[in-house]
Image: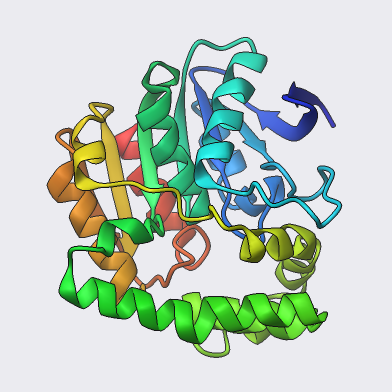
């Protein structure tokens, strides 16, 4: 696989197609393979690049890194784009990859032509929303922190299951096809790093969002968790050049629950 050297590490990627570049940014417990339902479809029109973020399979991860943050991944992404020999690209992200893409637009706006953000878990945006803050705290207490504690105790599959079920829906992990379960388990090292990072939720406010002029499509699922939908609402309110859409018949897995609808919405926007 081709790689781009980034600040002491390397990021592996695949690419298909020709045309304007589109960089795909996967979420937690994912990697470059997470976009299998998009690559061929998008490649009919674009040069599509799917990479694995730092610490994600098959990139190096020793399990003791503590610098995992959306800001770190955003800076990596900026360097990755230039490492490909590009000045800028369309950037499509999902889940924590959407958080990463959002921070990229805030920190390196010259690298982004257009943004597509699917259910970005920008928890700091909920601080001043009474309903959102309560739901955020409930998620952290009942899902995120227990999953992290399980990972530290070596209860790997249980920790992954608690997280996936807690961010998608009850029973989601066990319903994943075997190949998706395998992909997820290939990334348990990054998940241990992620759940132990003190800087995971990079600060981001409505005022920060107001400074982003990049054309942006914000997507959520009609069955996504309420706090994720509230984040999309807040971003739409704050970002001056954004529009929001709902991917029908989807949970937080907006790219895979209904890929036909998701792909159509993204390609129409781009």
* Quarter of the rendering containing residue 216: top left
Is residue 105 rendered to the left or right of residue 5? left
Image position, residue 55 (x, y; %): 74, 47
Left or right relative to 228: residue 130: left
Which residue lies at the image location 27% right of the left edge and 66% below the top edge? 229
* Res 224 seen here: yes
| Quadrant (top left/top right/bottom left/bottom right) for the C terminus | top left
Residue at 24% x, 39% y is 209
Q: In the drawing, does residue 134 fall left or right of residue 64?
A: left
- Which image quarter: residue 123? bottom left
Compare residues 179 and 18 and report the one nearer the observer: 179
Q: Is residue 168 visible?
A: no
- Count of marks placed on residues: 0
240 relative to 67, above or below: above
Above or below for 67 versus 30: above
**Which of the image's four quarters has the N terminus?**
top right
For residue 85, side relative to residue 209 (left or right)? right
* Vertical position of residue 7 compared to residue 269: above or below: above
19 or 88, which is in the foreground? 88
Residue 108, compared with residue 142, is above or below; it is: above
Q: Residue at x 57, y 89 (%)?
A: 171
The type of colouring in the image is rainbow
The x and y percentages for residue 157 are: 76, 81
Quarter-of-image position of residue 10 = top right
Residue 156, percent across and down? 78, 78
Q: Where residue 11 appears, x then y in whole percent?
A: 75, 33
């Amino acid at each position: 696989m081709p790689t781009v050297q980034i600040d002491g590490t390397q990021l592996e990627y695949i690419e298909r197609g020709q045309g304007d570049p589109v960089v795909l940014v996967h979420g937690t417990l994912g990697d470059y393979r997470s976009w299998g339902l998009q690559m061929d479809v998008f490649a009919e029109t674009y040069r599509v690049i799917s990479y694995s973020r730092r610490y994600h399979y098959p990139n190096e991860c020793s399990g003791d890194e503590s610098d995992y943050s959306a800001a770190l991944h955003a800076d990596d992404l900026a360097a990755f784009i230039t490492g490909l020999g590009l000045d800028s690209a369309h950037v499509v992200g999902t889940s924590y990859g959407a958080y990463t893409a959002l921070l990229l637009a805030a920190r390196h706006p010259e690298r982004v032509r257009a943004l597509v953000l699917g259910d970005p878990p920008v928890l700091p945006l909920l601080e001043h929303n009474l309903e959102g803050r309560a739901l955020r705290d409930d998620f952290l207490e009942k899902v995120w922190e227990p999953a992290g504690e399980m990972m530290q105790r070596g209860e790997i599959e249980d920790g992954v299951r608690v997280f996936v079920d807690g961010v998608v829906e009850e029973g989601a992990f066990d319903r994943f096809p075997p190949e998706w379960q395998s992909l997820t388990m290939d990334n348990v090292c990054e998940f241990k790093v992620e759940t132990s990072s003190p800087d995971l939720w990079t600060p981001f406010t409505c005022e920060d969002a107001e400074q982003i002029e990049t054309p942006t499509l914000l997507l959520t699922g009609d069955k996504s968790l309420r706090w994720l939908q509230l984040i999309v609402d807040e971003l739409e309110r704050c970002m001056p050049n954004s529009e929001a859409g709902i991917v029908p018949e989807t949970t937080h897995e907006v790219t895979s629950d209904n890929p036909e609808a998701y792909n159509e919405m993204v390609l129409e926007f781009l």
